[in-house]
Each structure stands twice: as structure tokens, then as C-alpha cells.
Image (cartoon, rainbow, N blue to C red):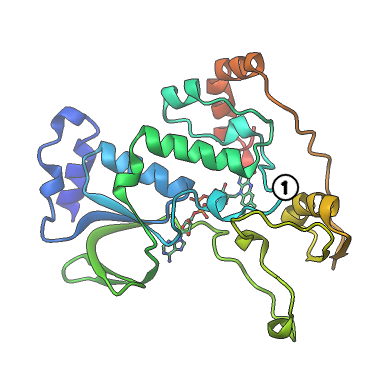
């Protein structure tokens, strides 16, 4: 294993790649990444650049993670768009235009698709692949990964890019099962447009998601009730469009912005 790691490190100079993909040829992959959100996409980009035989296993039908799942009305960044994008590619920084200070979910998902298409990341990804278990064999230094579809894959290394917010936690309210109306967790909002005109809607919770969701639901619903256990502190978002000239200024400042992000708590400018 140490030998393999040394060899992988050597490839930082791309001219030194000598059949690295053939290492561990008895295994399905050298590296398996679980999750095709922002983190998994970056991991597979780096692995592909190094010539490592790797794949991403993603339970969703497509990439994007958080931004694939969370489609509730009002879903958008609450950190500034320009600080959220990848910093590894000058081309992406030059080409992508964030059109709002706090990007809506649809644009963020478009951004991730733009990056994936640009670097052809989908060819290294398998969708609809729910990982159910991983077992490590200490004698052979091998992981065996079991998928929901019954397949088993072997690999030397696993990178978990599962996200901290990718599994919704459903409340356990008595009688929930017998509720006859439509009900869902915000992160499982239906992908097709849901017309709330004339509906009576209840939102349970008043955190960051609810603060985005409530004003949008209120525009359409006949009646909206918010169940709030504790009041939350919230500040106006002050969202606004980003013009071409503003975006050009932001591009000029990217080095400074990412430098600030690297030195601040939670990576925010
Ligand atoms: C509504 C919302 C708004 C947010 N806004 C911001 C913001 O403004 N700024 C900010 O910095 N962060 C924000 N975040 C945090 C956000 O989650 C991260 O910024 C980032 O998108 C996380 O990326 P990730 O790749 O680590 O995880 P995720 O995007 O969660 O991706 C993880 C992926 O792993 C997959 N997966 C999980 N388990 C398995 C399994 N067993 N088998 C196969 N696949 C699996 C999931 O399906 C998912 O696609 C927000 C989160 C939410 C939910």
C-alpha cells in the first residue's frame, strides 16, 4: 500500500505517469468516491487528472448532491455566489457568470453541470448506485463495497463525499402516516412544479430552509401556518443581480477572495 501511495504522489508531474492505472489491476478500481456532490466532483476531477482508475458511486439519478436534491421554492445560497464556486480552474472562473449575489438552486445546479460537462466528469460516475455497506479486508488492504442493486465492487481506497446534509431527518409525529394531504421534507420537494395556489399549507420549522421557503409559499397558498418551536434570528438577504461589469470586477478579485476564504472560519469571505 505504501508503494502505491508513493507512486500516486509521483504523478503530480503528469509526465511521470507510467501505467499507474494498471496498479491493483486485480481490483475493480483503485479509488471509489461515494457521492457526486460538490466534493465528489472535485475528487474525481483530481483522480482523473492523475490517471487513477476511479469511479463515483451516487445514489441520485444525477450529480449535484445538495443542489440536485433541494428544489423547494426559494432554495438558494445563503453565502455569496462568487465565494462558493470552485477555485481550481482559471477557465471556469473566467467563463462562469454568477447572475445573482445569492444564486438560486437552479443556477447552482447549472453551474455544477457546466463544470461536469467541461471536464467530462460524468464518464467517471455511476448514478442510481446506493452504497449499502463497505468492508475492509486487512490482509489484502482491500475494500469491498456492496450496492443496493446487488453488485459488489473492490477497491484499494474509498473517499466518502457523502455530505453532512444529504440524508433528511424526518420527524416522528404521531399520526403522520395517516395524514391524507401531500407532505414532504423540504429536501425531497417534488422535481416537477407543484402548484400551491389555493392550498392550505403548514411549514414545520423556522430554520434557514424555512426562511427561504415561507415567503415563496405565502405568495401562492390560500393559507399558510408556520409551526415554530423557537424564534430564529434572521437578517435580510439583500440579494441583487450581478451585472457583466460587476462580474468582471469579481473575476479580477478572485485570488484575493479565495485567499480570504482560506483564512476565515467556515471559508466565507
Ligand atoms: C438547502 C441548503 C443550502 C445550502 N446553502 C449553502 C450555502 O449557501 N453555502 C455553503 O457553503 N453551503 C451551503 N450548504 C451546504 C452544502 O451542503 C455544501 O455547500 C455542499 O454542497 C456539500 O457538498 P458535498 O459534496 O460535501 O455533499 P452533498 O452535496 O450532500 O453530496 C453528497 C452526495 O452523496 C450522495 N450519497 C450519500 N450517501 C450515499 C450512499 N450511501 N450511496 C451513494 N451515494 C450517497 C448523496 O446522494 C449526495 O448526492 C447548503 C445545504 C443545503 C441543504
Residue at the (45%, 50%) spot, across then down: 63
Taking 77 as reference, is 59 above or below it?
below
Q: Is residue 211 shown left or right of residue 69?
A: right
Q: Position of residue 176 (x, y in %)?
A: 72, 81
Q: Picture coordinates of residue 73 (x, y %)?
A: 71, 51
Left or right, 126 with reference to 199: left
Coordinates of residue 19 in the picture (x, y in percent) = 10, 41
Compared across the picture, whether 123 is left or right of 103 comes to left
Who's the residue at 74% across and 74% down the image?
A: 181
Label 1 sits on a secondary structure element that is: loop
Q: Residues within 10 Å of mark 1 (few under 14, many from 20)?
A: some
Look at the picture and state if 136 lies above or below 256: below
Image label count: 1
Residue under the image location 54 percent in, 34 percent down: 262
Q: Quadrant of residue 191?
A: bottom right
Can you say which quadrant of the picture contains the N terminus?
bottom left
Q: Please tell me which residue lies in front, 127 or 142.
A: 127
Q: Disc 1 marks which residue?
A: 74
User: What residue do we see at 62% from left, 36% from top?
Assistant: 264
Q: Quadrant of the C terminus?
A: top right
Q: Which one is in front, 81 or 18? A: 81
Q: Is residue 248 above or below residue 159?
A: above
> Where is residue 34 shown, x and y percent of the image?
38, 58
Cβ of mark 1 under 8 Å from ligand 1: the answer is: no
192 or 131, nearer to the observer: 192
Choose between 131 and 265: the one closer to the eye: 131
Amino acid at each position: 500500500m505504501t508503494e502505491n501511495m508513493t507512486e500516486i504522489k509521483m504523478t503530480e508531474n503528469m509526465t511521470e505517469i507510467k501505467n499507474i492505472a494498471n496498479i491493483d489491476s486485480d481490483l475493480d478500481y483503485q479509488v471509489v468516491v461515494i457521492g457526486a456532490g460538490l466534493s465528489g466532483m472535485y475528487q474525481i476531477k483530481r483522480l482523473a487528472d492523475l490517471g487513477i482508475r476511479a469511479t463515483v458511486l451516487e445514489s441520485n439519478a444525477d450529480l449535484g448532491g445538495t443542489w440536485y436534491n433541494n428544489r423547494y421554492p426559494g432554495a438558494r445560497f445563503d453565502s455569496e455566489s462568487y465565494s462558493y464556486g470552485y477555485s481550481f480552474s482559471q477557465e471556469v472562473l473566467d467563463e462562469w457568470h454568477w447572475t445573482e449575489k445569492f444564486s438560486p438552486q437552479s443556477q447552482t445546479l447549472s453551474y455544477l453541470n457546466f463544470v461536469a460537462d467541461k471536464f467530462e466528469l460524468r464518464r467517471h460516475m455511476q448514478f442510481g448506485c446506493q452504497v449499502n455497506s463497505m468492508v475492509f479486508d486487512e490482509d489484502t488492504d482491500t475494500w469491498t463495497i456492496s450496492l443496493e442493486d446487488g453488485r459488489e465492487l473492490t477497491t484499494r481506497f474509498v473517499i466518502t463525499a457523502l455530505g453532512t446534509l444529504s440524508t433528511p431527518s424526518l420527524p416522528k409525529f404521531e399520526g403522520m402516516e395517516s395524514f391524507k394531504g401531500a407532505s414532504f421534507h423540504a429536501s425531497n420537494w417534488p422535481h416537477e412544479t407543484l402548484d400551491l395556489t389555493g392550498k392550505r399549507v403548514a411549514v414545520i420549522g423556522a430554520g434557514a430552509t424555512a426562511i427561504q421557503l415561507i415567503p415563496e409559499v405565502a405568495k401562492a397558498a390560500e393559507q399558510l401556518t408556520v409551526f415554530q418551536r423557537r424564534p430564529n434570528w434572521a437578517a435580510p438577504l439583500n440579494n441583487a443581480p450581478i451585472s457583466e461589469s460587476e462580474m468582471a470586477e469579481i473575476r479580477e478579485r478572485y485570488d484575493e477572495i479565495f485567499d480570504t476564504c482560506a483564512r476565515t472560519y467556515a471559508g466565507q469571505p
